[in-house]
Image (cartoon, rainbow, N blue to C red):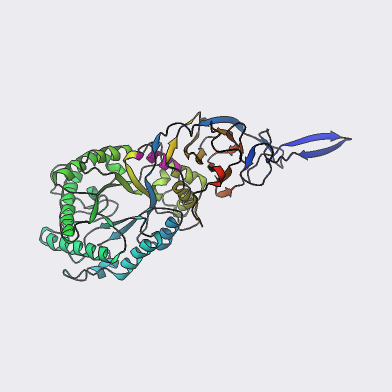
Amino acid sequence: MKKTIKYINVILSALLINVIFISCSSETGLTESSETEKPSESKDVISNSQEAKVFTDVTINSYPENSAITNVDYRRGLAAQDIDEPRIARTMAVGGNIVMIPIGLQKNSMSPDFPTKTTNSPSQSIIDALNVIATQSEGKVDLYVQISGTPKIYDTEDVEKPNNGNFYPLPTSSDRDACVENIASWMYAIEQQVNMPITWLGTQEPGHTLGEDSNAPGNKKEYNLDKFISYWNQIEDELKTLNANAKLGGIQLNSGNDGLYDYTINKIESENLQLDVICYQLYGVGGLTDGSIGDAVAATNSYSGNVKMVAHRTLWLKEMRRALGIDPQDVDALTEEGFNTSEGMIYFLRTEKQYQAHASGVEGYCVGKPSEDLGSMVYDVLGWLQNTPKKLRELTDLPNGVDGFVLAIDKKYMAALYNTSDVDYNITLNLNTDQYGEAPELNSTLFSGTSKIENGSGILYDYASQAIKEIELEKNDVILIELLKDGTSLSITKF
């Protein structure tokens, strides 16, 4: 447990007496986040080896009474690995309100859904799994179902498989009409049996996953996008003859294809494809740049359909290796570092901050492939984010290597801070307001390495100075803070 306790050596009659000063806060206007010793003013921690850890005192400022920078009202949730009920249930338990389910139509496991070219009854397992989401969420979750590929009962185009990644060739021109009709009927049958709305997304990253046609004129990715937008438009037309209120999104480009965002929007417009959301697979977020979020929002804003963008796959586990310096082949280490360490949570919170910068154009984002450990830190951070107020407030005077954000309203103040520097800081966080009263409820969660400390980090609220004090952050530490006036908690149940 990280606490700062000052030891004073007093020599009396040749004896060394250690005196530990413990203060309580009930009469001093101090509110602590746990029933622990109040840290002293010294920032020296004496270890058993008598080596001192020195914390550098810094003061940062927040302004919860000033006008909000922006409203952060987008959705956060899960990009599942197939229909993964435990992860989906865990996401909804912490308040996640958007879920993306991928279904590969070309996989052998899906063949029972398309046993013939005229029979397309959805498998009961798919219906049951989607209805679990509907029941557990009470219909309050936005459900996206991404279907990729061509059912095996249809012939596909003669194109070369990409050098790496998935391969989803389109049906041949002779099979295309039948395939489109069958897929649309299958989608409609699912809509009829699932007790919540579905937004359908098509093949992921069609710019390259459709394969390479050696006869393609000009830019091969643009050629693939032209083909897919025409194909998806045909599916939309067929589905909407069955259900005029059906919802569809597109076109699933990734961060590496940001040079094609404007081209894709222009093609969607020229084909008169009517989309309810523009969706992207933004794997490159969380680093020092925003991973094409800004470009995606700008392109989406140019679409005449007046919709926002959804990153239905982001914070992808495989991509976190770029920031964390992990061997991409070391799956176990990658999982642990990505979603079960404070360093991974910095990556997550940096991702969140990048979406905040473009909040007005973002419908939501889905965290991709969290750890199978359902107690992993990613669910704690996701739940905390889902419990935050919507008003993003100014946070200033941050020292080198420390970053974060504040979301606050008049009775609820929540701050996330993280330290990526080699300096150990003792932070005073000024609120610059007394609107939270003399004795608000103070909660905190500290992530340090693989440890999680709830209400035991020793931070305290000082009403006299209108500040949260003794926030000690070592390298790669993360702290989540919640200050509630009159015990006004909007917290949800967490496992």
358 within the magenta span = yes
- Residue at horizontal 49%, vertical 32%? 63
Q: Is residue 362 visible?
A: yes
Dominant secondary structure of the residues highlighted in magenta in the image: helix
Q: In this view, does 376 lie to the left or right of 6?
A: left
Q: In the image shown, does 215 or 4 lie closer to the viewer?
A: 4
On the image, the x and y values in percent for residue 384 come to 48, 48
- Relative placement, left or right, of 52 versus 386 is right
Query: In the figure, is residue 182 to the left or right of 410?
Result: left
The quarter holding residue 286 reads: top left
Closest to the observer, 11 or 161: 11
Identity of the residue drawn at 37% across and 58% down: 81
Determine the residue located farthest toward the left in the rendered image. 174
- Does residue 155 appear in this view? no
Question: In percent of the image, x 35 and y 60: which residue is there?
Answer: 82
Q: Where is residue 483 in the image (x, y as percent from the top left)?
A: 54, 42
Q: Which of the two residues, 279 or 345, is positioned nearer the viewer here?
A: 279
Q: Give the range drawn in magenta.
A: 349-359
Residue 44 appears at what percent x and percent y?
67, 35
In magenta segment, residue 111: no
Where is residue 318 drawn, in percent x and y? 39, 49
The foreground one among 453 and 275 is 275
- Relative to 95, is 153 on the left or the right? left
- In this view, the residue farthest toward the right is 13
Tell me which corner region of the image, top left, top right, bottom left or bottom right, holds residue 143: bottom left
